[in-house]
Image: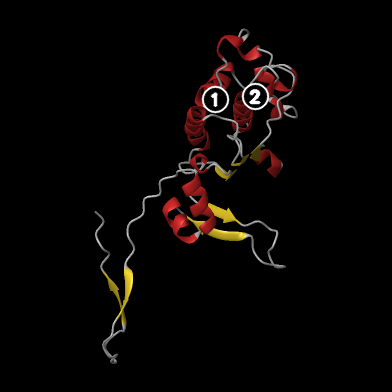
Amino acid sequence: ASWLNLIAYVPQQAQVFDGTIRDNLLYRFTDEPINVSDQELWAIMQKLKIDFGDRLTEGLDTRVGRHGIELSGGEQQRLMIGAAAMRKPIFMVVDEATASLDATTEKAVQKGLEEVLGAHIGALIITHRLSTVRRLCSKFFVLRDSEGLALGESQLEAAASSFEELYSVSPTFRVLADDQGVVVLDSPQPRLEVSAEPVTDREESIRYAEPESIT
């Protein structure tokens, strides 16, 4: 199989087309036999909170209207995340896919994404909303605006394995975290203390002082 079949992409702008919920969840299967049970479709809908209430008059065969006009922006995005998950990829690219969701729905979708991604699917998640990635990702990268960079200069400002680490090394991340009210718990770092005593072969002029207690 082509490596493209192993990668799923969820764009920032949901690409919902005229058809049913079933059609949109399975639209990536057009070039291969479709052998997906209704139970599997309902399971992914439940995980990602794809629940349109009373509008599900025909169940999975409910029509969504031209370009998904019957759905809200958040509902369209969840439907596209479901379509990507149905591919059972080994890698998923998620590009600002929760941008149109309110905070409550975003948390529900995040939990669903955690279940979908699991331990066997890698993911690149692009977002400006830090809450989207805090629980989902194990590695974080901050990119600088390419404008103003010298030729050949890297856009990578910082890379870290936690928000706490990133907060300490990335000015851009600190601004975003503070603006979005993201709580970053960080233990006090030891201070460098310079000794005024003469240096000998067996002594060091710089030693670590104990961090001050926080009250």
The local secondary structure at tag 1 comes to: helix
For the question of whether residue 120 can be seen, the reply is yes
Q: Residue at x 65, y 19 (%)?
A: 71
The local secondary structure at tag 2 comes to: helix
Callout 2 crowding tier (Cα within 10 Å): few <14, some 14–19, many ≥20: many
Q: Is residue 76 above or below residue 99?
A: above
Callout 1 crowding tier (Cα within 10 Å): few <14, some 14–19, many ≥20: many
Q: Is residue 211 above or below residue 93?
A: below
Q: Are dots 1 and 2 in contact, CB under 8 Å? A: yes
Q: Nearer the viewer, residue 180 or 66?
A: 180
Q: Amino acid at mark 2?
A: Leu
Label disc, if present, on residue 166 of the rendered structure: none
**Mark 1 and mark 2: span between their CA atoms?**
9 Å
Q: Position of residue 141 (x, y in %)?
A: 55, 54
Q: Nearer the viewer, residue 122 or 13?
A: 13
Q: Residue at x 60, y 24 (%)?
A: 75
Residue 144, by quadrant, is: bottom right
Q: Position of residue 99 (x, y in %)?
A: 59, 35
| In this picture, residue 102 sits left or right of residue 5 | left
Q: Amino acid at mark 1?
A: Ile
Q: Residue at x 65, y 40 (%)?
A: 6
Q: Earlier in the sequence, mark 1 or mark 2?
A: 2
Q: Is residue 156 above or below residue 207?
A: above
Q: Nearer the viewer, residue 196 or 73?
A: 196
| In this picture, residue 43 sits left or right of residue 66 | left
Residue of label 1 = 44
Question: What residue occupies the far top of the structure in this picture?
Answer: 57
- Quadrant of the frame with the N terminus: top right
Residue 29, by quadrant, is: top right
Q: Residue at x 64, y 29 (%)?
A: 80
Residue of label 2 = 25
